[in-house]
Image (tube, grey):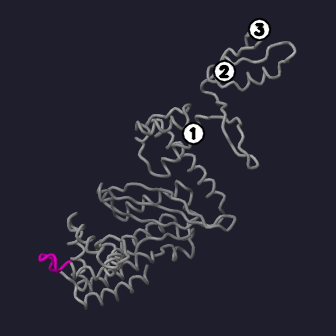
Amino acid sequence: MTKKIVDGKVKAVCNYCKSKLAGSSNAGTRHLSAHVENCIRKTQTSNPGALQKLLATKKIDGKTVIANYNFDQGVCRKDLVNMIVLHEHPLSIVDQVGFKVFCNSLQSLFKVPTRNTVRADVFELYKTEMKKTKELLEKNEGRVAITTDMWTADHQKKSYMAVTAHFVDQSWGLQQRLLRFQNIPSPHTTEVLGDYLMKVLYDWNLDLKLSTITMGNCSVNDGLVEILVQKIGSEELLLGGEVLHMRCCAHILNLIVKDGLDVIGTILENIRASCVYWSSTPKKIEKFEEATRQLPITCNKKLSYDVKTRWNSTYTMLETTLAYKEVFPRLKKRDAQYKTLPSVTDWEKAKIISEKLKNLL
């Protein structure tokens, strides 16, 4: 504070924000101390990296008041990383000009970290969550069930395996944690997969707490379970390992439905071909939508054709086309090249198949 005469009165002028306060001997010093403690410009100048005291509005007992709050760069960085992980944003989001402008408009004191800093923060978050999960599993006195599955990413042509733990905690709450998600290079033999799963169990200290492992119903997994029993030891498993392999009911159901659809697949050929035809180009989609608007149809779903490896997509295709079945005859009159109009019998059979598939969802 600097003592000055302003308009004939003694004033104490803040050296940082230049605010003019009462400076006479009769005014005391309590208000000066309070200003020095809360001066925003002083905090920014003396220690830019420290917690910043700012003014913000908040509601107390239904009334809006102005109060102090502390800005913490570290907390904001942590929240940013949590957002990126939660919503699967690319790390490059922090390099985008629009994102930086948006952050600056919300809080000008926040310095947007670089992509490398965010990457390091993500790994730190992973280590923290991994430590918490390990502590939770160590406290759990019961056994842990494992589920695992593999699939191939279409755009990368790489195979991945996920391993998830399921257990009941001390409060009798069902818990599940993703333990590992990793690329598995070829070949995918029982020995390779067995070594990978054992490494996961060892890393999480679950080899002696394993109850069951749920996998798809295929011969490779049968051999995989035999390897696990040999490496862990039948004496450490429930009933000597007889109940270790739990066959995935969803996979079994999927095989049953796919076999059934292969038998009756020819019934749906005209419906499938119609979906492909009227969704193949933007012009045909426009014609289909125009014909739909001319009829009292409330369905707003778009046409889609099924994928052979996913039987639930067949149900989606049938459910949608059945809602639009009155549209296809009108389109037949307008387009001579449309030659796969489903017959009345096709629609009747499609309705029956759709009802049966609905019960399996």
Q: Secondary structure beneath disc 2?
A: helix
Q: From the viewer's side, name the closer residue of 12 and 251.
A: 12
Residue 324: give x, y in percent of width and height.
31, 79
Residue 22: give x, y in percent of width and height.
79, 17
Q: Is residue 42 left or right of residue 332?
A: right
The residue depicted at 51 percent of the width and 66 percent of the height is 146
Q: Secondary structure beneath disc 3?
A: loop
Residue beneath disc 1: 76
Residue beneath disc 2: 42
| Above or below: residue 266 compared with residue 169 | below
> Disc 2 and disc 1: Cα gap in Å?
22 Å
Residue 121: give x, y in percent of width and height.
51, 40
Q: Write down the region rendered in magenta.
A: 331-339
Q: How many marks?
A: 3
Viewer-side label of 2, 3: 3
Amino acid bearing label 2: Lys
Q: Is residue 264 left or right of residue 43?
A: left
Residue beneath disc 3: 8
The residue depicted at 54 percent of the width and 74 percent of the height is 240
> Disc 2 and disc 3: Cα gap in Å?
27 Å
Report if residue 272 lies within the magenta region.
no
Pick whichever of labels 1 and 3 is earlier in the sequence.
3
Q: Quadrant of residue 96?
A: top left
Q: From the viewer's side, name the closer residue of 204 and 315.
A: 315
The residue depicted at 43 percent of the width and 48 percent of the height is 89
